Amino acid sequence: MTESTAARKPRRSAGSKAAGTTGAKRTTRKTGTAAAKGSETELVQLLTPEGERIEDPAYAEYAQYVADITPDELRGLYRDMVLTRRFDAEATALQRQGELGLWASLLGQEAAQIGSGRATREDDYVFPTYREHGVAWCRGVDPINLLGMFRGVNNGGWDPNSNNFHLYTIVIGSQALHATGYAMGVAKDGADSGVIAYFGDGASSQGDVSEAFNFAAVYNAPVVFFCQNNQWAISESNEKQTRVPLYQRAQGFGFPGVRVDGNDVLASLAVTRWALERARRGEGPALIEAYTYRMGAHTTSDDPSRYRHDDERAAWEAKDPILRLRRFLESANHADEGFFGELEAESEALGKRVREVVRAMPDPDRFAIFENVYADGHALVDEERAQFAAYQASFAEAEGV
């Protein structure tokens, strides 16, 4: 797999950073819950949907972390998002063709994932959910391994310790506890690396996440909680889950929380660098709420048209994270048509490779689900296996008619 080295340079210590000359836009948003009615929520933003770089001294604390970003690094971030989106689109199409059992699309969340993923150092450790395909890309995990898992022919396909990227977690919210425990171990070892745990707005309602917050705060664990608030926990909207903005929950546990424009890759990169560096310095956990939107279905088994309107998606399409950065690159003369053309060709090659490799994968063993359930076997499992075998055989009989 090829990947950009943009934003992978060794980080300077926070003390060596000069105050940024470019700050973040102070954006306020009315909350949609009755308890918080009339309150305003700040949103850290460094790049507008129109692709304009903006200044606000109020957010210089975060903006300094990308003040010296180079055109090459910006092109690298753009490349990461484009290739991640292409990979995701191919995976969705392959599932529709019956090549994958399921797929959880990241469409619309590329900036949150690439920005935060590129903020990590090689020695940091990442605990994902099941949608962090962009973060996996940043950590050097071959996307083919992700597809093998969703095809059912492997259980992850990569060694977590090789990339410091844990296996995908399907159980909602449990990885927040895993990350906290790992971060406590990092602190006891005296290492200066950080840990980051990803979860969605739906998972924030799980008790595991609250327990992780509490342990992380009490033990001052070097962990960053990165919540991708894509507005919908499958079909459940934010308004039915929380009465305050999610980032404000951190206050009750005694550590800082920040809401960032999750469709702004620069802001996502800057805020995550800030949070990870303070964690590495021993200043404890932080919560980042990346305010973004899931453009597609929750998974390919979901139909979002049953619970949300097309005009909602259209409003978020106007804030597309990839288009936003492209506008900035073009207006700042950081990229030309040659760059975009070469990237399009690379994107096509990636799509072709994904299709060919997945179609060459073996079919999963349909009966593997019955193995290793009980150490000594079980009569009920044997009965279910026999029923399933008869069901499978019925297809062969129908084809022979």
Image (cartoon, rainbow, N blue to C red):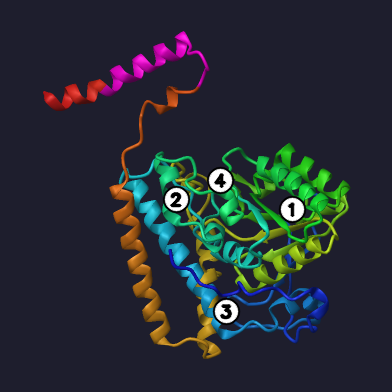
Amino acid type, residue under disc 2 in the picture: Asn
Location of mark 3 (residue):
73
343 and 310: which is toward the camera: 343
Q: Spatial distance from mark 4 to mark 1, Cα to Cα?
A: 23 Å
Q: Spatial distance from mark 3 to mark 1, Cα to Cα?
A: 31 Å
Q: Which residues are magenta?
A: 373-392
On-image quarter of the N terminus = bottom left
**Mark linked to residue 246:** 1
What SS does tag 1 mark? helix
Amino acid type, residue under disc 3 in the picture: Glu
| Mark 4 neighbour density, 10 Å: few (under 14) some (14–19) many (20 or more) | many
Q: Spatial distance from mark 4 to mark 2, Cα to Cα?
A: 11 Å
Amino acid type, residue under disc 4 in the picture: Tyr
Note whether 99 is above or below 136 in the view shown.
above
Task: Describe residue 166's horizontal placement relative to residue 254 as left or right.
Answer: left
Circle count: 4
Residue drawn at x 54%, y 59% as measured from the top left: 312
**Is residue 36 visible from the viewing direction of this image?**
no
Q: Earlier in the sequence, mark 4 or mark 3?
A: 3
Q: Quadrant of residue 98?
A: top left
Q: Earlier in the sequence, mark 4 or mark 2?
A: 2
Q: Spatial distance from mark 4 to mark 3, Cα to Cα?
A: 28 Å
Which x, y percent locates residue 252?
87, 49
What SS does tag 4 mark? loop
Q: Spatial distance from mark 2 to mark 1, Cα to Cα?
A: 32 Å
Query: What residue occupies the far bottom of the structure in this picture?
Result: 333
235 and 187: which is toward the camera: 187
Location of mark 4 (residue):
168
Note whether 331 is above or below 308 in the view shown.
below
Instruction: Based on the picture, tell me whether residue 291 belongs to the magenta stretch.
Output: no
